[in-house]
Image (cartoon, rainbow, N blue to C red):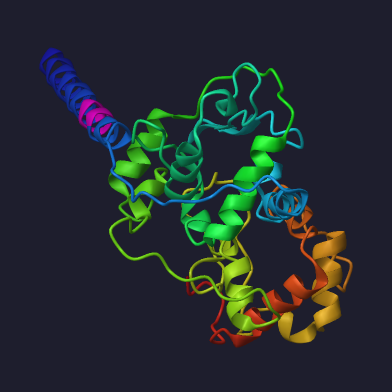
Amino acid sequence: MKKFIKRSGIVLTALAALIIVLLIVVYFQTEARLTKVYAPPTDALTIPDDAESIANGKHIFQYRGCEACHGEQLEGKVYLEDPAVGKVIAGNLTRGEGGYGASFADADWVAAIRYGLRPDGTPLLFMPSTEFYYLSDDDLADVIAYIKSVPPVDHIQPTSSLSLTGRAIMTLVPAITFVPAELIPMADPRPVAPEAEVTAEYGAYLSMSCKVCHGLTMSGGVIPGMPSDWPPAPNITFGGGSALPTWTEQDFINALRTGFTPNKKELRAQYMPWNSYKFMSDDELRAVWLYLQSLPELGYGNR
């Protein structure tokens, strides 16, 4: 009996030591990624200050979901707090106390929005720059013009952080990263944005954020990296398991305006951000509808 207890103690001690070593490895590997300094391209944007550009910037800021994260006054807020991931803190963008606007130059806004980087070149956590990377220069310039026009709000808060579990996920699952800058092809020529018209091409440009949940193919499924209590994303191609083949264009527009499908099923805003997409114009929503119709008809879950 004594020998068994002694051996069990040795095994438990060895396991504890192994776990400690693994945690140390996970911490330092992720810390190296979080403190890596990037050298993004120098994008020379001219930031306008006229009312029309600022209004367009606000429109983009709203339908792209920026307002849902950063607040109606751009004051910032805690977007998500989950032990499995960490704290997702949307920063104060204004010139008030605790706000980035007090110190950011135009180039800093470009780096943060388009490339997910701080002014010192280190990456921002959770900032969805993989979507905003595709914004045209004109659209991005208008968004920055709008941010700069908003009155200052004093709101001091901490920055985003990864939990130990989040760090482990990012280390052990190569397909998941909470550092979007790692996914942005900074060395490649930037893609050219399509003309703003009712086309499938423009619809693809407008709906880049949909791929975060619905997958690159838009066929839905379990969303990698999201909390375990999040529901899987539905298939929004016209393939198997999708409800869209039974919808009309007007059904689609109404769903994103009201948050209810044609059969009165509620689109829960905490998972499906229809309350951001409702700010799209009818023509923008028609373009998105054309894009969804143009996608390969895939079965559910072929992300």
Residue at the image position 68 percent from the left and 83 percent from the top: 290
Q: Which residues are magenta?
A: 23-28
Report how many numbered discs are placed on residues in the image.
0
**Which quadrant of the rendered structure holds the N terminus?**
top left
User: 157 or 165, which lies in front?
Assistant: 157
Res 147 → quadrant:
top right
Compared to residue 122, the image places residue 285 above or below, namely: below
User: 163 or 256, which lies in front?
Assistant: 256
**Percent from the top left, x then y, of residue 8?**
18, 21
Residue 26 is covered by the magenta coloring: yes
Residue at the image position 56 percent from the left and 75 percent from the top: 194
**Percent from the top left, x then y, of residue 38?**
29, 41
Visible residue check, residue 70 = no
On screen, residue 127 versus residue 81, left or right, reads: left
Residue at the image position 75 percent from the left and 72 percent from the top: 285
Residue at the image position 89 percent from the left and 67 percent from the top: 264
Compared to residue 13, the image places residue 65 above or below, namely: below
On screen, residue 102 versus residue 111, left or right, reads: right
**Percent from the top left, x then y, of residue 68?**
70, 43
